[in-house]
Image: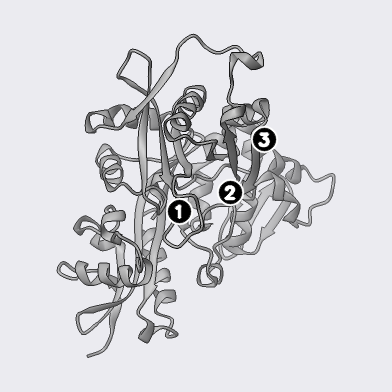
Amino acid sequence: MAIEGPRALRKGELRSGVELADRVFRVGWDSSMEGDYPVVFCEDNLEGLRVFVDEGKVISLVGMVESPICLLGTSHRGCCIGAVCTEPDYRGQGLATRLLIDAREKALADGVDIFAITGGRGLYRRQGYVDVGGYHVCTIERSRLPSTSRGIILKKEGYVLRPWRVEDVPALVRIRSAEPVRFVRTPEDFLTILSSGNVSNRTGETRVVCKKGSDVPVAYVSYHIGGAPRQDKDPNAVTVMEVGGPRWAIVQALGRLMDEGGLDDVTLHYLDCDAEMVQMVGSFGWRSEPRGFLGTAGIIDPAGFWQACAPLVREMLGHERSERLGLSADGSITVTYGDEALVLDGMSAFTRLVFLPQHRRGELELGLPGDSELAGVLDELFPLPLMDYGLDYI
């Protein structure tokens, strides 16, 4: 029998797909990919599990999950890619490459404009996906938390941490919806992800932050504990991968988390565009360093992305200047402003123009003259922030 695919996983093949993913990604773990990623490996997502099958056995797999994305008030459709794997005996035949192309074609047909892949393998880079996005990792030391003894005025109210509960989900959705850069989650997806106990591919927890004397969540923190199997990391170390809500309340709650665990510090991941956190890091002297996206990304539909960004472009440039700015994506991608034109060599170049973080903008070689109006407009618009995985890591 010939190998079947690329195609969607069929009902009755889910177990075979999970077993393949576990053989590749869960050797030495006490968990299964099915339990860790229930939004991916479920019968509701059979169309999102792209496979090759040989005699009823899944031999190559790409997992995809599509969801809305919000970037500074603009609405996009994103596709996350993960669990890319092939049985050893079938490697070297280009099966994963064909599945990734198949996933992209499905995503484009579904109206996706942003592709995000967990990983930076040559397989992804050869298809034009790049390392972009601006993020930071800071170390919050207990000795450097804000306190009255250091002359810093604390707000009167205090905050406490408690485990999340099912009845908290509507409040968590509201808190999440106020974040300007995010994957958009339904209450059902939020509940499914939280129930898995997995935070960015590690065993983790989500705790809600409440004001003292109240049981109503005002914020939340999601963090993993320790590291991956065989990773040389303190098993009690806390790494915060996603937060929602007022940063001041979150930082006070992290102080309580350190007190609970007897920790000297916690690690926090945050976006470049998180102005409140950026200010707190600077004010309290926390050590921070930049990092890239936890994988690779690409704007697979430049024209659709540009159209979705139109309201933000008008807001930033005003009506007259935004009307002079245009984009065409017939073969090459061309950005125009009045009589000026910038021709970009495909998806990679456009993705880097939009999402390459400020500290890496020197890598761009646009070839525009110093007095170029187009160059000035592009500097005003970009970089845009790219969403971070957080709980949506697959």
Q: Give the label, 3 or 1, closer to the camera.
A: 1
**Foreground residue among 244 and 71:** 244
Residue at image coords 57%, 34%: 140
Q: Residue furthest top?
A: 156
The amino acid type of the residue labelled 1 equals: Gly
Q: Determine which residue is flagged by label 2.
A: 133
> Given contact means CB atoms under 8 Å apart, are the residues at marks 1 and 2 in contact?
no
Determine contact: label 3, label 1, CB under 8 Å: no
Give the camera-side residue of 136 and 203: 203
**Element at label 2:** loop
The disc, 1 or 2, on the residue closer to the chain's N-terminal end is: 2
Disc 1: which residue: 227
Classify mark 3: helix, strand or loop: helix
Point out the frontmost of discs 2 and 3: 2
Neighbor class of circle 1 (other Cα within 10 Å; few <14, some 14-19, many 20+) is some
Image position of 285 (left or right of 182): right
Determine which residue is flagged by label 3: 321
Q: Secondary structure at mark 1?
A: loop
The reply, left or right, for residue 372 in relation to residue 190 is right
Mark 3 is surrounded, within 10 Å at the Cα level, by few (under 14), some (14 to 19) or many (20 or more) other residues, namely some
Task: Bin the neighbour count of mark 2 within 10 Å (Cα to Cα): few under 14, some 14-19, many 20 and up.
Answer: many
Q: Pointers 2 and 3 in contact (CB under 8 A)?
A: no
Front-most of residues 290 and 224: 224
Q: Position of residue 247 (x, y in %)?
A: 51, 26
Dot 3 or dot 1: first in sequence order is 1
Whether 370 is drawn above or below 23: the answer is above
- Residue 392, horizontal then vertical, whole percent: 39, 48
The correct choice, above or below, for 31 with respect to 20 in the image is: above
Q: Earlier in the sequence, mark 2 or mark 3?
A: 2
